[in-house]
Amino acid sequence: MDVTRTQLEELIRAIHDVVLIRKDISRLAASKSCHFGALSVLATLAASGDARVSQLAETLMVDVSVASRQLAQLEAHGYVGRRADPADGRAHLVFVTEAGRHELESVRSDVVDHFESALHRWQGADVDTLTSQLRRLRSDLGLSRPEAPPDAQVQPPGPNHSRARSGQASGTDTEVRVGPDHPNHQQHRTGVEALS
């Protein structure tokens, strides 16, 4: 490998900067009515289609109570609705309303506008190269990671966890580990990427 440890250390520092960029995107995506966590749920539901709350929670890899709380906020703003499940009259399906789709499109547009303004000196080829290399890095790191047992995919935070229980920082009170080999990884990633 023609890469020095110093170069790798610099890469790791740059990745930390990417994490900060992700936080900036979260702030940009937070609308006047919903925080980023709820909007991520909305985007995931839009990507996956109508679903029971339990199915949506499984896709998001969070507890049903977390998904229910996010959906309650979205429902209060008219972004999601509920209807009887034709396969089981006792159950309900949640779906994205027209208002919800409009909100997602508005948030998406705001984020793209910000990037368009910030990167106005970039060439299209620069964007393509960065996108390709970030995906390559994500793939290679995922392939080299030891496989976690299935029950380790979702872990509640410990008592000294830095996130507040209210979920104000991240929109949830559950730490979600989304591995590339998890069966719901693609749907979850699609939902999150819909906001950025």
Image (cartoon, grey):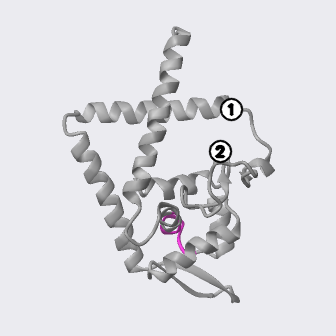
Q: Nearer the viewer, residue 21 or 2?
A: 21
**Magenta part of the chain:** 44-50
User: Mark 2–mark 1 contact, CB under 8 Å?
Assistant: yes
Q: Which residue is at 19% across, 34% downward? A: 121
**Where's residue 149, x and y in %?**
80, 44
47 within the magenta span: yes
Q: Which residue is at 27% across, 31% downward? A: 125
Q: CA distance from mark 2 to mark 1?
A: 9 Å
Mark 1, Cα crowd under 10 Å, few <14 / some 14-19 / many 20+, is few
Mark 2, Cα crowd under 10 Å, few <14 / some 14-19 / many 20+, is some
Q: Badge 1 is on which residue? A: 145
Q: What is the chief secondary structure element of the magenta stretch?
A: helix
Q: Callout 2: helix, strand or loop?
A: loop
Number of residue marks: 2
Q: Badge 2 is on which residue? A: 179
User: Quarter of the image containing the N terminus?
Assistant: top right
**Where's residue 82, x and y in %?**
56, 85
Q: Callout 1: helix, strand or loop?
A: loop
Quadrant of the rendered structure where residue 172 is? Answer: bottom right
Check the image and report above or below for 32 versus 181.
below
What is the three-letter code of the residue carrying label 2? Gly
Q: Is residue 35 left or right of residue 83?
A: left
**Where's residue 46, x and y in %?**
48, 68
Check the image and report above or below for 25 versus 29.
above
